[in-house]
Image (cartoon, rainbow, N blue to C red):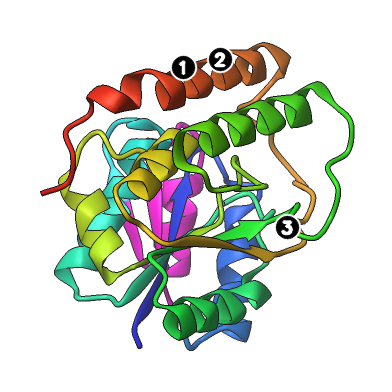
Amino acid sequence: MKLLIVIPAYNEQDNIERVVDNLIENYPQYDYLVVNDGSKDRTAQICRDRGYHFLDLPVNLGLAGAFQAGLRFADRQGYDMAIQFDGDGQHNPSYIGEMAALMEEKGLDIVIGSRFKDQKKHLSLRMMGNQMIQLAIKMTTGITIKDTTSGMRLLNRSMIHEFAQNLNYGPEPDTIAYLIRNGAKVEEVQVQMMDRIAGESYFNLRRSVEYMIRMCTSIILLQWFRKRRG
């Protein structure tokens, strides 16, 4: 079983060494690929100096474009599984084995590393947004995904190919909902996320609200007009 850890990285000069060195030293059974998403800091230079496996995108494509670039590599190299993995150090690679085992055991298409599968969500505006997206997915698919915004998602071989070939397949909750509606089997594994040590999250208060509205609108309305998988 060949598994690739895809690490989209934008301006992660203060985190990328810690993330990748941990994988190299403690999880050599997995391959990894840093996708430098047109960073303006020293992320690319650090990858070169350290001899990391990385793709250096000349411009910033955003998370969706960077992740797709990594999945195109995984598709061409014949990987059986690929996992989306944050470059800021919040994702814990110790859960990858459990996620992969569950995928193989149950023949799943996607396994989500979930902060809330067995734990309650704390009260905050961002978690209220997560709850609303969860409700939108439940309304349109009949399936409950408790951590809709988790960025730790493991894909099987067929999903790798599908994400690699379709430009409108972003690594977002609306795509997960769309795939479930079209027969994809998705489950969650309880994980513990770590705190970001350096840098800033993209999602401030305003962006979090905008994201929630955009995802709910897409899940409830726009995805019904998307072309179904052949």
**Label 2 CA crowd tier, 10 Å (few <14, some 14–19, many 20+):** some
Tell which residue pokes out farthest to the right in this image.
Answer: 123
Q: Residue at x 56, y 15 (%)?
A: 213
Secondary structure, mark 3, is loop
Pick whichever of labels 1 and 3 is earlier in the sequence. 3
Give the amino acid at mark 3.
Answer: Lys
The image shows residue 211 at horizontal and vertical percentages of 56, 20
Amino acid on which the number 1 mark rests in the picture: Thr
Quadrant where the N terminus is found in the figure: bottom left
Q: CA distance from mark 3 to mark 2?
A: 23 Å
Of label 3 and label 2, which has the lower sequence position? 3
User: Marks 1 and 3, how far apart in space?
Assistant: 24 Å
> What residue did someone put label 2 on?
213
The span from disc 2 to disc 1 (Cα, nearest Å) is 6 Å
Q: Residue at x 41, y 22 (%)?
A: 218
Task: Say the numbered circle drawn on residue 217.
Answer: 1
Element on which disc 1 rests: helix
Q: Which mark is residue 117?
A: 3
Residue drawn where x is 89% and y is 31% of the image: 123
10 left or right, relative to 53: right
Query: In the rendered structure, does residue 53 fall within the stretch colored magenta?
Result: yes
Q: Between residues 105 and 122, which one lies in front from this camera angle?
A: 105
Q: Which residues are magenta?
A: 31-55
- On the question of residue 15 being in view, the answer is yes
- Residue 186, horizontal then vertical, whole percent: 47, 59
**Which residue is nearer to you in this view: 76 or 112?**
112
